[in-house]
């Protein structure tokens, strides 16, 4: 298993910027957390969510209680969050992100092992199994297999589906200034990897659990 950098004690500037980020997110989006299928827990978990905006993980992070926020790390692309002083500061000192090298030709560490090591060290993770922002009209893109391999490696860890509603309207692609809209972050019932479950069956089940949280889903059935 790859060794992930241990969870950091955030620096004073990192904590200050983190609080400012949370305040701004609340002002612009009025975001509220809806713990529909579970309650906040200090146990390591994998939160997996739909991905429509660069601010998705910030909204999840914002609605967590402070103690949970301190032990939850977003999984993010190393090439993006290592480019430039500002992004490096945000990724390292504010969000304490688990950075993954997306280039499977040049990378030297196993990303699944890297994430598993972070869970082993007591952190919860925020993942976006679509792998990229969804800019289509479809509610979800097909899931990448990383969620399956991580769940198989850590079968005792709860995987919590999280639906983020409306953030794509707050920060549409190509716009630099946010547009005020109310956003909701809904947490569903945790699921776990089942022994012998194959990859596609697991990914289909995970995707269905996430789609079930989408507003309006199931109405009229």
Image (cartoon, rainbow, N blue to C red):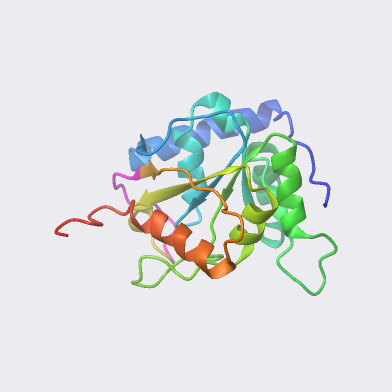
> Which picture quadrant has residue 197?
bottom right
Q: Is residue 27 left or right of residue 113?
A: left
Q: Which residues are magenta?
A: 174-184
Tell me which residue sits at (70%, 30%) in the image.
10
Q: Is residue 171 visible?
A: no
Residue 44 location in percent, x, y?
62, 36
Q: Quadrant of the C terminus?
A: bottom left
Residue at 80% across, 42% down = 5
Residue displayed at 51% across by 56% down? 54
Q: Does the stretch in magenta take in 182?
A: yes
Q: Position of residue 141 (x, y in %)?
A: 45, 70
| Residue 93 percent across, percent down from the top left | 69, 38
- In reply to whether residue 172 is colored magenta, the answer given is no
Classify 6 as above or below 91.
above
> In front here: 62 or 115?
115
Near-viewer residue (189 or 57)? 189
- Rendered location of residue 17, percent (x, y): 59, 34
Q: Main secondary structure of the magenta part?
A: loop
């Amino acid at each position: 298993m790859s060794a992930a950098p241990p969870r950091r004690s955030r620096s004073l500037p990192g904590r200050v910027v983190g609080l400012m980020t949370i305040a701004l997110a609340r002002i612009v989006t009025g975001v509220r957390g809806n713990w529909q299928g579970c309650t906040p827990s200090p146990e390591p978990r994998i939160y997996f969510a739909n991905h429509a905006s660069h601010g998705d993980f910030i909204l999840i992070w914002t609605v967590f209680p402070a103690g949970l926020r301190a032990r939850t790390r977003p999984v993010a692309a190393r090439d993006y969050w290592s480019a430039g002083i500002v992004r490096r500061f945000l990724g390292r000192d504010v969000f304490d992100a688990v950075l993954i090298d997306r280039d499977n030709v040049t990378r030297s560490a196993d990303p699944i092992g890297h994430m598993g090591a972070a869970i082993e060290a007591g952190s919860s993770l925020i993942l976006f199994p679509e792998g990229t922002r969804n800019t289509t009209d479809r509610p979800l893109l097909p899931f990448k297999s990383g969620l399956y391999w991580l769940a198989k490696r850590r079968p005792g860890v709860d995987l919590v589906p999280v639906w983020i509603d409306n953030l794509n309207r707050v920060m549409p692609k190509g716009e630099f200034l946010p547009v005020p809209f109310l956003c909701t972050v809904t947490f569903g019932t945790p699921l776990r990897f089942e022994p012998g479950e194959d990859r596609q069956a697991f990914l289909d089940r995970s995707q269905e659990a996430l789609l079930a949280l989408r507003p309006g889903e199931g109405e009229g059935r």
